[in-house]
Image (cartoon, helix red, strand yellow):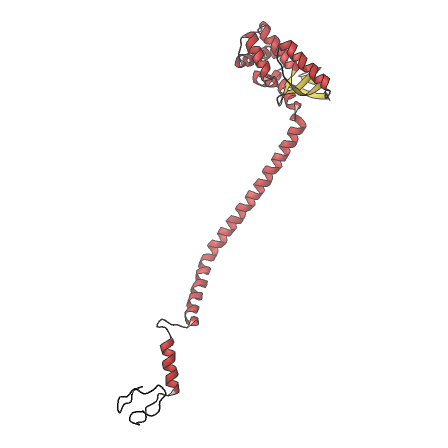
Amino acid sequence: MKCKHCGYEAPERAVICPECGEILPRISDTEDEKKTSRSTEPDSFSMPFLGAAPVEAEEEEQEEIQDPVERKRQQREKKTRLRRRITGIIVLVLVVVICVLYGVFLGGYKLAVFRYIKGMDYSSGSLYTAVIPDAYVDYLETTYDTTRREVKEMVGDYFVSWNKNYGTSGRMHYQIRYASKLNDTDDLRALEEDLKSLYGISVEIQKAVEVRLVIYDSKKKWTEDAVFVKIGGRWCSMTAMDTIDYVCQYDGYNQW
């Protein structure tokens, strides 16, 4: 502080000016504390509670305005999740049911039996030729100078004539009376030799089943024994190969 009498800068807490002995004026402790507190506060200082109340009131008002919309959105999302969950459960149940039905009715060789019977019933060359191996198709093309497509057409035309004279197209049903698996290696090798001697094809048979079928065609009923073999992952019919060979050999028994 400066001495008002002589202008000497006295120490901070001096009471008397060391130069002239004049008593130095003092600022009261209260004013000093106020000055100190004012100097340490930032220019933009404000008490937290003074600005918080309007902000909270504004947020509450905004929540009250948006609450119905948000509630509807959450309800829609909940319904959407519920529909998706129900749809997923239904799809899973359908897949399980289809797998069970496939295993019971069309699993393994049963699908070949279905194609074998329904190929005749619906006069479908595509269904009937689905139970022959590719090596056998090569044999037909080489032996009778024909193609896979022509074989399908000939077989379809043959069964159209057969159903007209002997059957009732579209009303043929069947039952598998019994099925006997041929697990013996000698039986499988014997079937391979039959295919080689009859059609000149060399294939490996993984499995074989001898099936007795009861076939119903309108009021007619008969039994038929057929052998189905698994070649290269496909179940094939030995009887179908025999029938197709005769159809190609005799031009469909002159049915067209």
Residue, x 67% and y 12% (percent of image)?
A: 194
Q: Which of 161 and 197 lies nearest the eye of the viewer?
A: 197
- Image coordinates of residue 123 in percent, x first then y, are 58, 15
Quarter residue 217 falls in: top right
Q: Is residue 109 visible?
A: yes
| 4 left or right, relative to 89 | left
Residue extending farthest to the front is 19
- Image coordinates of residue 32 in percent, x first then y, are 37, 84
Residue, x 39% and y 79% (percent of image)?
A: 37
- Image coordinates of residue 216 in percent, x first then y, are 68, 17
- Image coordinates of residue 187 in percent, x first then y, are 72, 17
Quarter residue 41 falls in: bottom left
Q: Is residue 225 visible?
A: no
| Position of the C terminus by quadrant | top right
Quarter residue 10 falls in: bottom left
Residue, x 43% and y 68% (percent of image)?
A: 52
